[in-house]
Amino acid sequence: MNKIAILIDSTGDLNAELREKYGIDDYCAMHISYDGKEIPASLDWDAGVQPEELYKVLTEGRRIYTSAVTVQEYETKFTKYLDQGMDVLYISCSSGLSASINVAHQVADKLNPKYKGCKVVCIDSLVSGYAQGLMGIKARELANAGKSVDEIGEWLEKERLKFNQVASCETLRYLKAAGRVTAAAAFFGNLFGVKPILISDAKGHNFAIKKVKGRLPSIKEVAKMTVEGCEDIENSTIYIGHIVDPEGAEMLKQEILKLAKPKDIYVGMIGPIVGASTGPGTISAYFYGKEVTVVGEK
């Protein structure tokens, strides 16, 4: 059986340390652009911009634009491993948020006939952030257990709606501007003091499922939904993502620990693509648990 290279993309939010720890071979870079410059959306923040600088753009009322993974990036990353006789499993950002998966399929369809004995399999995660990264971690576990690239792909497609994200946002203004949430949801999210609670729905869209007044109550709600969403929390690792807000992330961690004792809680930065869409003040929890069945309203 071929060795398997596991790839995510710039919305997968696993930094270099986590990618090495969990056997994620690489990621396919999207791009961000602002103030007339375009740079790769690096999960390691090594592309010439730091988080504080990037998110200052948003707080000052300027726009950050994001773009899908290019054909050239996919070809470069896929052929790197195909040329070594490896299969490639690529787990993309949700098709509800990015066109990247469509480009990936086009490149895979072009490359697969040229490589005999190895292949590229592309999976639409229907989620983003650390939940997408968790899919990559699970894929490596399955590969280490001897599963083929096709078997892993089939398992991920069957289980992908169990990779959850729950977030508290300061406002839906940035998501609305980026076209990442419905206008109706953005309306109540901008009412004074109201903090929207976002999930990734069953079609891979961001959906404001609740509204909570006040920062601490909204963080408590994220903690409650996280604990309720985990089917086996004592054996679960929960990922907490934040946008230049370690204090808020620590608040969420402590609220979760008041309710349950998960196996582990990891706290880290949200990457530049997700961050450019959700904006400062976002605190998110990601976990494998109950299947998402909610479909957001248009």
Image (cartoon, rainbow, N blue to C red):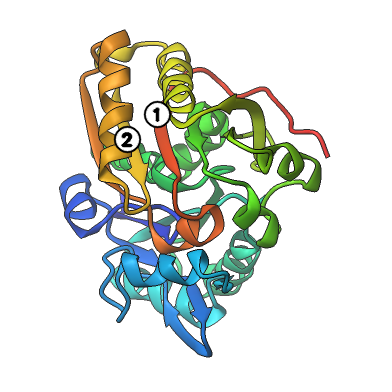
Task: Indicate the secondary structure of the residue bearing disc 2.
Answer: strand
At label 1, counting other C-alpha atoms closer than 10 Å, the crowd grade (few under 14, some 14-19, many 20 or more) is many
Q: Viewed as shown, does residue 61 lie left or right of 239?
A: right
Q: Which residue does the image show at 25% across and 22% down from the upper left?
A: 254
Q: Is residue 127 above or below residue 215?
A: below
Task: Indicate the secondary structure of the residue bearing disc 1.
Answer: strand
- Quarter of the C terminus within the rendering: top right
Q: Which residue does the image show at 32% across and 19% down from the upper left?
A: 255
Q: Quadrant of residue 256?
A: top left
Depth order, front residue of 17/254:
254
User: Outermost residue, bottom direction?
Assistant: 36
Q: Which label's residue is closer to the chain start, 1 or 2?
A: 2
Q: How many numbered marks does the figure carry?
A: 2
At label 2, counting other C-alpha atoms closer than 10 Å, the crowd grade (few under 14, some 14-19, many 20 or more) is many
Residue 157 in sight here: yes
Q: Which residue does the image show at 46% across and 25% down from the upper left?
A: 222
Please, what is the three-letter code of the amino acid marked with disc 2?
Tyr
The residue beneath circle 2 is 239
Q: Residue 211 in the image: x percent, y percent?
A: 63, 27
Task: Tell me, for residue 287, which label it has, or none.
Answer: 1
Q: Which residue does the image show at 52% across and 41% down from the upper left?
A: 169
